[in-house]
Amino acid sequence: MNHYHPMYYPYYGGYYAYPYYPWPYAGMGCHPMGHTAPLTHMKLPLEILVDATTTSQSSFIGGLEDAKLSLEYLKTGTSASLKVSVTQAGTTTVTDVTPLADDYQIKENFLTVSPGATVTLDVIDCTARLRWCEIICC
């Protein structure tokens, strides 16, 4: 018999009559039921996209670690403006990105935010995208 048999599980040459788990469940962190070996951490890419039609978008930041925000934008009018608001721990910080260059721009690691924060992207005469990756346990 092997340890996959529905009724018997191996034990040093004998067999248990109840489920056998080769590793005990730790009950915390990234651990699957029945194993202490951690599951893999995965990066989950997320984004907010705003343009002339949808000028404001908000999103909740989650995950296990701080997220580094990247900002991409393209000016589409003469009176363009772009603001990024971050609310975390009861405090709101507004970053006004001015002046806007006429061509496509990208700012890597623009801001770092903690899980539980809310980010809002507001634009006028501009197309912009705020991207980040959340580290999750799978």
Image: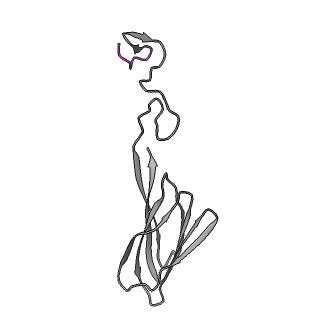
> Residue at position x 50%, y 32% from top?
26
Q: Give the range drawn in magenta.
A: 1-7
* Residue 9 in picture, x, y percent from top left: 42, 15
* Residue 136 in picture, x, y percent from top left: 46, 49
Picture mark count: 0
| Rendered view: 5 above or below 115 | above
> Residue at position x 50%, y 77% from top?
53
| Rendered view: 84 above or below 27 | below
> Residue at position x 44%, y 52% from top?
135
Q: Main secondary structure of the magenta part?
A: loop
| Rendered view: 66 above or below 54 | above
Q: Which residue lies furthest to the top in this view?
A: 14
> Residue at position x 46%, y 35% from top?
32
Image quarter of residue 118: bottom right
Residue 104 part of the magenta segment: no
Q: Residue furthest bottom?
A: 78
In depth, the one of 4 and 118 nearer the eye is 118
- Quadrant showing the N terminus: top left
* Residue 127 in picture, x, y percent from top left: 43, 77
How has the structure been colored for display?
one colour
* Residue 129 in picture, x, y percent from top left: 43, 71
In screen coordinates, is 93 left or right of 50?
right
- Quadrant showing the C terminus: top left
